[in-house]
Amino acid sequence: MKLSSPKKVFDLDNFLPPDGENSYDMSFSRGDLTLDIYYDSDDSKGEQKKRVRFVKARHFFKSPFPGISFFDCPDDRDLSLLNSIVEYENSELLDKDSEFPGSSNYKHYRVFLHSVGAAVYVVAKSIEVSD
């Protein structure tokens, strides 16, 4: 499936240390996909957690990163977007999904978790980032 025109919606460099995340957990409940990202803080507080909640998630895919992806987006090679949550302006999956009732206002997101080798793609209404 083709994707294009990714734009940064959240910069993971705002909280992740240079050596990246330690681990992550993914859970799905009541229509929301939650991604808990664990990392060591720079100020000796020990392991910290950030939560990314994909509100009203309709589809989600997890694949190895780097690795072969179900999605094709040459723009994902842009180094300035690698450590970010991005939203794709154009998504073949969203185009196909739009044929079904109740699929308006959905967005296609992606996050690469480098240190643990995972790529997570989510179609959802919105995202929320919290501690």
Image (tube, rainbow, N blue to C red):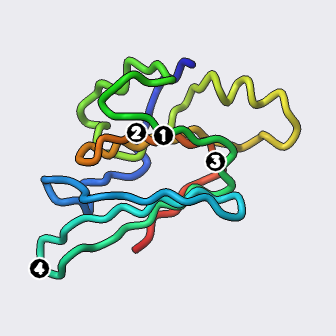
User: In which quadrant of the rendered view does residue 80 lie?
Assistant: top left
Are the residues tagged 3 and 1 within 8 Å (C-beta)? no
Whole-number angstrom distance, CA of label 2 to CA of label 3: 16 Å
Q: Quadrant of residue 63?
A: top left
- Which is more N-terminal, label 2 or label 1? 1
Find numbered disc 1 in the image and state the secondary structure of the residue it sits on. strand
The residue located at (36%, 27%) in the rendering is 76
Instruction: Give amino acid for label 2.
Output: Ala
Residue bearing the label numbered 1: 62
Do the CB atoms of the residues marked 4 and 3 lie less than 8 Å apart? Answer: no
Q: Which mark is residue 119?
A: 2
- Using the rendered view, name the quadrant where residue 84 is placed: top left
33 displayed left or right of 13: right
Q: Which mark is residue 102?
A: none
Say what secondary structure mark 2 lies in.
Answer: strand
Which mark is in front, 3 or 1? 1
Q: Establish if 31 lies above or below 93.
A: below
Q: Position of residue 32 (x, y in %)?
A: 64, 59
Residue drawn at (41%, 46%) of the image: 85
Q: CA distance from mark 3 to mark 1?
A: 15 Å
To which residue does mark 3 refer?
Answer: 124
Residue 124 point in image, percent of width and height: 63, 47
Q: Earlier in the sequence, mark 3 or mark 1?
A: 1
Element on which disc 3 rests: strand
Badge 4 amino acid? Ser
